[in-house]
Structure formats: structure tokens, C-alpha cells
Image (cartoon, rainbow, N blue to C red):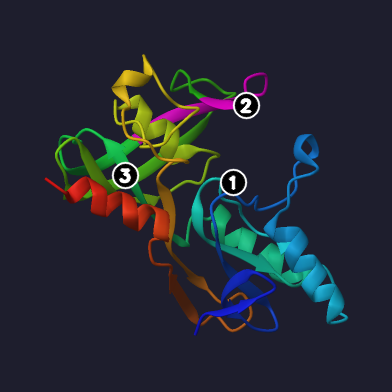
Amino acid sequence: MTRRRDDLDIVFEDKSLIVINKPAGLLTVPLERRHEARSVYERLAERLRAQGKRRPHVVHRIDRDTSGLVVFAKSERTQTLLKDQFRRREPERVYWAVVYGHPDPPRGTWRDRLIWDQGFLIQRRTHPKDPRGADAVSQYRVLERLQDTSLLEVRLETGKRNQIRVQARLRGHTLVGERRYTFGPESLRPIDFARQALHARALAFAHPVTGRPLRFEAPLPADMTALMEALRRP
């Protein structure tokens, strides 16, 4: 059962780990350049400290303006075990995204070689054999085709920063609300939405201590639900 504590939507918690349904607009972890912005990590640390427990340990991240599921470990050992699963690409990571246009074919695989541009703080596509780059692979399928947009399900095989956002844009399907990975005039993106329409919908992995399979889902948040309702209107 989902429990809400200290303004955090806690989906699951035990002695080893904690799964949070992060709202859009909240950082997963603090950023040096945005030291004034609050993060899930800081809120968790305060909560655990009040209980006489140690700080949380970061396992993976999702973007500030992406909503949905993220897991933290409660010990370094658990963190290592979970990170090893992510490194082996074992966890299931499913996102829902609203994009402009209609991907053709309606399901398939996105494969790119990406390199992080530290100057502009964005991912760029690079040559497939560029040793500085890293492979980015996503499986996508259209869940709902609307007049000028589509609701996609995207399953990550790799987990590069901003991966879905840049890969969708490279195919001409910019996310609704996207501000960073765009091309051309704003008139090509007429839908008013306050953030990129991206939600970490499902997360599954093996419990790092017991080995028991764990799977969690987070429903679309209110803003994306309202967006879908508006897009469905004739």
C-alpha cells in the first residue's frame, strides 16, 4: 500500500530499501549548481535521521521534471547489490511519454550512440564507433494514437541521462512540454504543458537481500491525466 510521509509518496519500504513515487519538479538528488532546490534524497535523509537511521544511498535517478518511480538503498551493501542489477540491465524500467506525431512503425527499438555535452548539459548523438560515447537502447510501442500526438510506452534497456527525451526527439517525436531537446520554431509544439510529459510508470527488480521479485507501478499523475483527457477531446 502506498503511504504518504513527510510529503513523500512512499510506494514500498523495508529494512533494505525504499521506493518513492517522485513528483515532477523535485530533484532526485541535490545538484551543486542548484543548491537551493530541494530533492528526494534530502527529504529522505531528514526522515531517516529523525528515526536515528543512516542516510539513504542513491541507486539511480530520474530527471527533475519527470515523475514516477525511483529506488533508494538504506545501506552501502544494498546500494552495491542494486547498482549491480542496473549495471547488468536486469531491472524492468517502463516509462509513459506523450510525444508529437505518430511513430512509424508503432513499435520497435531505438538504438543510438550518445555522448554527454558537459558545456550545454545535453546528450548528443555521436558516431557508432566513438569511444567517448555510450550505447542507448529503448523499446517503444504506441499505447494510444491521438490526432497529433501519441502516448508511448518506453522500456529502457540502458539508462543514460535524458535517454528517452533525446531518442524520441532524434526520430522527430519531441515530447510534449519538452524545453531542452527541441528543434525548429515553437509553433511546431503548440501544446501548453509545464514540463516534459514523461512518467516512470513501472519498476521491477530482485530484492537485493532475499532475491524476491519486486514490481511496482505508479499511476499517471494528475497533470498528465488532464493532458491526456484534453488531447482526447475532438
- Residue 169 at what x, y percent from top left? 36, 28
Tag 1 or tag 2, which sits nearer the N-term? 1
Tag 2 or tag 3, which sits nearer the N-term? 3
Using the rendered image of the protein, determine whether residue 153 is visible from the camera's viewpoint.
no
Q: Amino acid at mark 1?
A: Arg
Q: Which residue is mark 3?
A: 98
Q: Which residues are magenta?
A: 111-123
Q: Residue at x 63, y 59 (%)?
A: 83
Q: Residue at x 47, y 38 (%)?
A: 163
- The label shown at residue 54 is none
Real-space Cα separation, disc 2 to disc 1, in angstroms: 14 Å
Q: Residue at x 59, y 24 (%)?
A: 132
Whether the magenta-drawn stretch holds residue 113 is answered as yes
Front residue of this view, candidates 64 and 153: 64
Quadrant in which residue 176 is drawn: top left
* Element type at mark 2: loop
Q: Is residue 7 left or right of residue 135?
A: right
Position of 25 relative to 77 (above/below): above
Q: Which residue is mark 1?
A: 64
Q: Mark 3: give few (<14), some (14-19) or many (20+) Cα within 10 Å.
A: many
Real-space Cα separation, disc 3 to disc 1, in angstroms: 17 Å
Front residue of this view, candidates 18 and 125: 18
Which residue sits furthest left?
A: 234
Tag 1 or tag 3, which sits nearer the N-term? 1
Q: Amino acid at mark 2?
A: Leu
Q: Which residue is mark 2?
A: 121
**Of the two numbered discs 2 and 1 in the rendering, the one whose residue sits closer to the viewer:** 1
- Residue 177 at what x, y percent from top left? 41, 36
- Residue 188 at what x, y percent from top left? 30, 21
